[in-house]
Every structure is written in C-alpha cells, then in structure tokens.
C-alpha cells in the first residue's frame, strides 16, 4: 500500500479531491443516524462519517407481505451473466434476489452455461441467448447481436432492476452485446447494478454508466483499483477513503459506488455511508454475487417506497440506490455472521444464502 507522505501521486490526488470537492462536499459527507464513529480508525480518513442505521432502513424499505399484492409486485430482476467458465456467480446473484423476497429472477447467459444454471435451481428463469466469439463466425456477429437485443428487449421494461456482470467473462463479442443491453436498459430507465466483469466493461467504457443515477457499481478491491486508476488517474489512497470515493462517484456523474471491503463504503457523490457490521472472516468466492443480487432487490424496494411517499420531501431527497446498497450490505453481513457461527471454516457462499431469510426475518418479520 502506498503511503500519502511518500507518493507524489497521492499528493496530487488529495489536492484534486480537496480542490474539486471543497468544503461544500466535505460538509455533505452524509450521516444516516447512529452514533459517531470515526473512519480514521479504519482508514486514517480526514473525514468523519458514521455507521448507517441499516436496521431502520431495512425495516423502512422491506414491503409487508400483503395478501392483496400480486406476483411481480415484490420485484422482478434479471442477471446478465454466466459463461463457459462461470456458472456459480449468476446463480448466486439470482437466487439471493429470490431468497430476500423478489418474486421473479431471470438469468440471461451464454447457451452453454444455461443448462447448468437451470440444473442448480428450477426457481430461476434462464435465457440461453448470449454467445462468445469461439462459437460464432465473423459474418454472423451482426445478426446475432440484433437477435440478442430483440430477445432481451422483449423483457427489459418488465424488470425492476438488472444486474450486469456476475460470471460474465471477458469475451469481446459478448461484452459488445452486453454494452448494447446496458444502453437499452438506460433508455428504458431500468436500474443497473454493475458487478464482476461488468465492472471490467464499464471501466473500459465509462459512458455506459456516466451520469446514470439509477446505476450502482459494486467493486471489490481489484475492481475498485481499476476504477480509481481510470477515473481519478491515481493509485488507491486508503488514507482518505471517504473523500476518494465521493470524488470517484462524482467523476462518474453521480452513479452510486459501493466499495466492498472490511467496511463497505457507499457514495453517490453527495453522501458517504459506511456499513461495518461484523460479517464473517471467511472470504470464499461468491459473496459479492450475493451482494449484487441483494442490491437489485433492495434498491427496487427503496424506489417503490420513495415513490409512495413522494409527498414527503425528506424521503424524496434520499437516493434509493444508496438505501439499497446499505440494506444489502448489512443483510449480507448478518447472514454471513450467522452462517459462520454454524459452519466456521467450512462456511461457503451457499451456506450464507441459506441465512438470508432468517437475517431479514430478525429485522423485518414476515408477520
Ligand atoms: N463460482 C463462480 O462462478 C464465481 C465467479 N466469479 C466471477 O469471476 C469473475 C472474476 O471475478 P474476480 O473477483 O476473480 O475478479 P478480479 O478482477 O477481482 O480478480 C482477478 C484476480 O484478482 C484476484 N483477487 C480477487 N479478489 C482479491 C482480493 N480481495 N485481494 C487480492 N486479489 C484478489 C483473483 O484471485 C484473480 O486472480 C467475475 O465474473 C465474477 O463474477 C466470482 O464472483 C466468484 C464466484
Ligand atoms: N475484509 C473483510 N472483512 C469483512 N467483510 C468483508 C471483507 N472483504 C469483503 N467483505 C464483505 O464480503 C462481501 C463480498 O466482498 P468481496 O470483496 O469478497 O467481493 P467479490 O470479490 O466481488 O466477491 P465474489 O467472489 O462474489 O466476486 C462484501 O459485502 C463485503 O462487505
Ligand atoms: Mg465479484
């Protein structure tokens, strides 16, 4: 890790952050309730911010199980991901959405990944429509691209949110198709959670999400590093983590960014929130996929909640994508902690998924 005192790059970054954000944005580092907790203890940040009151957010946005509601009203989400190498990631994201309470969960994946993902669960609606370069001829590209778009287009407006990237892979033709799917989602005002290889794509072409307030990026340590390099042009600076994230989110035009780590930091360029509830010391793969599926559901619920309470000006100022991130991060950590209590070193992502329901039940009981 670079030290700010020893790096001219970091000095430049600090200067940029302070100049561009100025005191105005420092004042808006947001505090969603709860006792003050200095981030400096963890990050050495010059910013004081607080732990988000995730329990009250979870209670506020989780819909009641009302018998008058019909299928679909609790959320319809889609995961765009799943290829030859990765079939677990899209499954984890899509099944987590259902376990939290969404009504329908789709997966749009490559043709060869589809039967495998279907075999994991009959609950998922799996569309075998994407193609990788190895399986097509050059002259077929254009017609396949339009077929993919027509197929996804039939569904797009029905979705409350799409998750782009878990287990997507990095095949160039596949990523071209997914870029077009993201543009379609934007035109249809469908929120987009970008994770995994979707972040690789977005880091190469930031315009896919720039200025889109219904997008959330959920980078892990490597994905965050690449984003910071691309947007800010520096190395990651953990000394001023909150300011850096604020600056990054503003650099992408107000897109929400959830930086995953020991504590999860969330910013939309206006506020910075932290979720640091104890989770699990196990770092098995797939936990980020649970998170992206969960953000899709909770941000959809937060949007519903805010649109119902639109007359209340204090609620309508709140960014539903930020609320969705706080709720998802907290729920995952609570579920991970329960799974670890039970399974200890043997804890795997599938074990954590099994605790999502109980974790939410403790905060927002079904009846
Ligand atoms: N079972 C599955 O199908 C899974 C598939 N996954 C998918 O795998 C693809 C690549 O994701 P990655 O997260 O590996 O991509 P990254 O770009 O984060 O990782 C690339 C490399 O960095 C390493 N790395 C990852 N996390 C690290 C950390 N915290 N500190 C230091 N090094 C780290 C990895 O081992 C890998 O060699 C994505 O599409 C992702 O969704 C993952 O979600 C894990 C589970
Ligand atoms: N050091 C840590 N301590 C506690 N929790 C952590 C730590 N690192 C990550 N997490 C939590 O684990 C979850 C997944 O983060 P992680 O960085 O593993 O994502 P990822 O690499 O994208 O995962 P995936 O393997 O699904 O791609 C996040 O919600 C984060 O809060
Ligand atoms: Mg990941």
Image (spheres, rainbow, N blue to C red):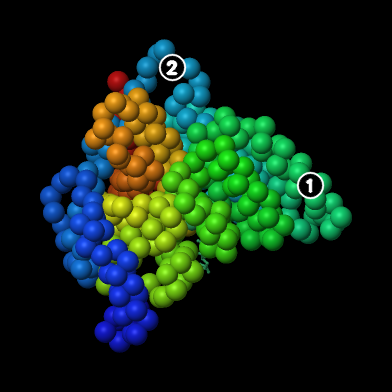
Left or right: 220, with 364 as reference point: right
Tell me the SS state at disc 1.
helix
Q: Nearer the viewer, residue 366 or 206?
A: 206
Quickly name the residue at label 1: 144
In this rendering, the count of numbered labels is 2
Queried on whether the Cβ of the residue with tag 1 lies below 8 angstroms from ligand 1, the answer reads no
The location of residue 120, given as percent across then percent down, is 59, 40
Q: Residue furthest left?
A: 35
Q: Nearer the viewer, residue 227 or 309?
A: 309
The location of residue 11, given as percent across then percent down, is 31, 80
Question: In this view of the protein, can residue 347 be seen by the observer?
Answer: no
Vertical placement of residue 276 versus 44, above or below: above
- Taking the spot 37% from the left edge, 17% from the top edge, the residue there is 66
Which quarter of the rendered picture does the C terminus lie within? Answer: top left
- Foreground tag (1 vs 2): 1
The location of residue 159, given as percent across then percent down, is 54, 33
Which image quadrant for residue 152?
top right
Please tell me how crowded label 2 is: few (under 14), some (14-19), or many (20+) other residues with Cα within 10 Å. few
Q: CA distance from mark 1 to mark 2?
A: 38 Å
- Taking the spot 31% from the left edge, 34% from the top edge, the residue there is 316
Quickly name the residue at label 2: 69
Please tell me how crowded label 1 is: few (under 14), some (14-19), or many (20+) other residues with Cα within 10 Å. some
Question: In this view of the protein, can residue 329 be seen by the observer?
Answer: yes
Vertical placement of residue 75 versus 186, above or below: above
In the picture, the disc for residue 16 is none
Tell me the SS state at disc 2.
loop
Going from N to C along the chain, the mark reached first, 1 or 2, is 2
Which quarter of the rendered picture does the N terminus lie within? Answer: bottom left
Q: Nearer the viewer, residue 254 or 331?
A: 254
Vertical placement of residue 167 versus 294, above or below: below
């Amino acid at each position: 890790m670079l030290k700010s005192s020893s790096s001219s790059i970091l000095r430049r970054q600090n200067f940029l952050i302070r100049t561009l954000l100025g005191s105005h944005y420092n004042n808006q580092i947001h505090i969603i309730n709860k006792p003050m907790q200095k981030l400096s203890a963890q990050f050495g940040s010059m910013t004081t911010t607080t732990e988000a009151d995730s329990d009250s957010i979870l209670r506020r946005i989780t819909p009641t199980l009302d018998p008058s509601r019909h299928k679909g009203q609790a959320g319809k989400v889609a995961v765009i991901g799943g290829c030859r190498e990765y079939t677990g990631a899209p499954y984890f994201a899509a099944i987590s959405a259902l376990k939290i309470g969404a009504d329908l969960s789709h997966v749009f994946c490559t043709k060869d990944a589809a039967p495998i993902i279907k075999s994991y669960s009959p609950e998922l609606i799996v569309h075998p429509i994407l193609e990788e370069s190895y399986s097509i001829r050059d002259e077929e590209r254009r017609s396949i691209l339009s077929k993919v778009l027509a197929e996804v287009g039939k569904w797009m407006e029905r979705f409350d949110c799409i998750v782009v990237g878990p287990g997507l892979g990095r095949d160039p033709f596949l990523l071209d198709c997914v870029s077009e799917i993201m543009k379609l989602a934007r035109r249809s005002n469908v929120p987009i959670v970008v994770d995994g290889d979707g972040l690789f794509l977005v880091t190469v072409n930031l315009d896919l999400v720039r200025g889109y307030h219904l997008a959330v990026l959920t980078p892990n340590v490597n994905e965050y590093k690449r984003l910071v390099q691309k947007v800010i042009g520096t190395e990651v600076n953990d000394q001023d983590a909150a300011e850096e994230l604020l600056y990054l989110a503003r650099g992408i035009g107000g897109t929400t960014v959830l930086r995953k780590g020991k504590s999860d930091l969330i910013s939309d360029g206006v506020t910075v929130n932290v979720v640091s509830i104890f989770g699990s010391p196990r770092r098995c793969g797939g936990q980020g996929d649970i998170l992206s599926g969960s953000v899709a559901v909770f941000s959809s619920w937060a949007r519903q909640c805010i649109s119902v309470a639109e007359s209340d000006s204090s609620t309508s100022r709140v960014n539903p994508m930020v609320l969705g991130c706080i709720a998802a991060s907290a729920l995952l950590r609570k579920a991970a902690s329960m799974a670890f209590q039970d399974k200890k070193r043997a804890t795997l992502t599938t074990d954590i998924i099994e605790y999502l329901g109980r974790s939410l039940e403790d905060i927002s009981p079904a009846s």
